[in-house]
Image (cartoon, rainbow, N blue to C red):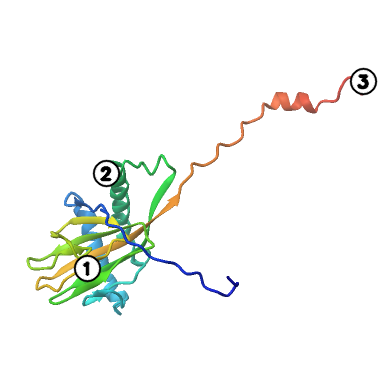
């Protein structure tokens, strides 16, 4: 193969199962309220909806958590839940393995009648999540791999491996969601400082030898 030739990558598929996690965030009304306020504020400060797989009346910028600090608490909450899901359901303690999770993308979306999301994945992220800030009766569920239908409700958190294909069908009910992607990163404890040297010992070592 020459230096300019492109490598050929072949493809196989295998039937497998992938975990999907969910949790109720009703006990965090302040975080949810701030997130909802942030989307309204972003719709004013960044009114141009981002073009993506999301076919909604409005989608905020990909890095919305860096544009509005009100999204920071809910992002931290989601990473904490993702770590707990790994520990509880995947027998993986990320902290003990010196790995952390960080939200790298975060965006809000406002769905109205007939809005939807075409099938897609969030690879190469590790985990993805969606928080349902509002969900009226009649709004469509999220569908994974065109097989598993997960019904939504207000204040619900859904997390899943980012490579999992998912979509949202057209519906009649409105909903407002906050979605995000997370990446793993190495998180090593800081190195221990060198031990402090005894001043008396240091002075003795620097003193001239007798007869010198």
The first of marks 3 and 1 along the sequence is 1
Residue corresponding to mark 2:
89
Residue 70 falls in which quadrant of the image?
A: bottom left
Furthest-top residue in this view? 210
| Frontmost residue, 39 versus 82 | 82
Query: Which residue does the image show at 60% across and 72% down from the upper left?
Result: 2
Q: Is residue 149 above or below residue 186?
A: below
Q: Callout 1: helix, strand or loop?
A: strand
Distance from disc 3 to disc 1, alpha carbons, whole Å, reads 87 Å
Label 2 Cα neighbours within 10 Å, binned few <14 / some 14-19 / many ≥20: few
User: Where is residue 13 shown, x and y percent of the image?
Assistant: 32, 61
Residue 18 falls in which quadrant of the image?
A: bottom left
The first of marks 3 and 2 along the sequence is 2
| Frontmost residue, 111 versus 5 | 5
Q: Callout 3: helix, strand or loop?
A: loop
**Are circles 1 and 2 on residues that touch, CB within 8 Å?**
no
Query: Which residue does the image show at 20% across and 65% down from the upper left?
Result: 146
Distance from disc 1 to disc 2, alpha carbons, whole Å, reads 24 Å
Residue corresponding to mark 3:
211
Label 1 Cα neighbours within 10 Å, binned few <14 / some 14-19 / many ≥20: many
User: Where is residue 156 shown, x and y percent of the image?
Assistant: 18, 56
């Amino acid at each position: 193969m020459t230096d300019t030739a492109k490598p050929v990558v072949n493809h196989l598929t295998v039937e497998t199962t992938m975990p999907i996690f969910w949790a109720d965030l009703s006990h965090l009304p302040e975080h949810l309220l701030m997130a909802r306020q942030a989307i309204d504020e972003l719709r004013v400060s960044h009114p141009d909806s981002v073009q993506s797989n999301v076919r909604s009346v409005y989608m905020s910028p990909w890095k919305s958590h860096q544009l509005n600090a009100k999204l920071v608490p809910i992002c931290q909450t989601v990473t904490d839940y993702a770590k707990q899901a790994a520990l509880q359901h995947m027998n993986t303690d990320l902290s003990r393995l010196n790995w952390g999770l960080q939200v790298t993308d975060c965006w809000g979306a406002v769905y109205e009648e007939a809005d939807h999301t075409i099938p897609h994945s969030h690879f190469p992220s590790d985990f993805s999540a969606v928080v349902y800030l509002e969900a009226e009766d009649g709004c469509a569920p999220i569908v994974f791999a065109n097989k598993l239908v997960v019904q939504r409700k207000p204040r619900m958190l859904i997390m899943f491996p980012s490579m999992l294909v998912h979509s949202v069908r057209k519906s009649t009910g409105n909903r407002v969601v906050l979605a995000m992607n997370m990446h793993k990163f190495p998180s090593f404890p800081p190195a221990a400082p060198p031990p402090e040297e005894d001043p008396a010992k240091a002075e003795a070592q620097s003193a001239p030898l007798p007869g010198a």
